[in-house]
Amino acid sequence: MALIGYARVSTQDQHLHLQRDALTSAGCSKIYTDTVSGSTTERKGLEEALGYLRTGDTLVVWRLDRLGRSLKHLIETVALLQERGIGLKSLTEQIDTGTYGGKLIFHIFGALAEFERNLIRERTNAGLMAARARGKHGGRPKSHLSDETKLQLAKRLYAEKSMPVADIYKSLKIARLTFYKYVKGYIKK
């Protein structure tokens, strides 16, 4: 059962000294680091740490915000660790998922994240229903060629084969798919 540390700073101007010292004092036998923004999805140091960790080990961080990009990402990471039988310890927040209190904290975080997802889903659905009640429908607008003169001209130019298709729809300022839909007869008009 090993304590493996992970430290991250956001920019080259920041230093890892404080985090490294705290992780070393906590008894970490190995420390992985990253110097990237928290919003960056690719973090090689974290990936290496996760690859090194084995069942029974504990990942130690100086603060929780060093581990997760967001609450959702943090909860996903902790869930992954739990699935693999790996603990998580945060030195600053004094959270240790190896204890009952630490597990309780993360269950509360998980419940809050699920509550937030449900609220977002509920608000989105309510907004869509309200828009539909006002006669609005989401999605891409239907393409149509309502200008009969433009449609006849496009059909004539296409039938004459005097100019490339791309030049026809570009000169008439209609979308390529709309051209094919109406002119080449993919629908009956």
Image: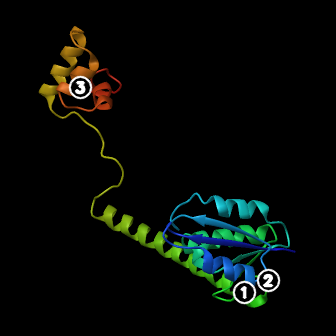
Image color mode: rainbow
Residue at 38% x, 64% y is 128
- Name the side, left or right, on which 172 lies relative to 84: left
Residue 26 locus on image (x, y percent): 75, 83
Residue drawn 27% across the image and 32% down it: 175
Q: Nearer the viewer, residue 55 or 21?
A: 21
Residue that mark 2 sits on: 98
Say if mark 2 contacts mark 1, CB within 8 Å. Answer: yes
Residue found at x 36% / y 51%: 139
What is the three-letter code of the residue carrying label 1?
Answer: Gly
As drawn, the residue found furthest toward the left would be: 149
SS for callout 3: helix
Residue 146, position in %: x, y?
Answer: 18, 35
Residue 182 % position (x, y): 28, 26
The answer to the question of whether label 3 and label 1 lie on touching residues, with beta carbons closer than 8 A, is: no
Disc 3 crowd rating (10 Å Cα; few below 14, some 14-19, many 20+) is: some
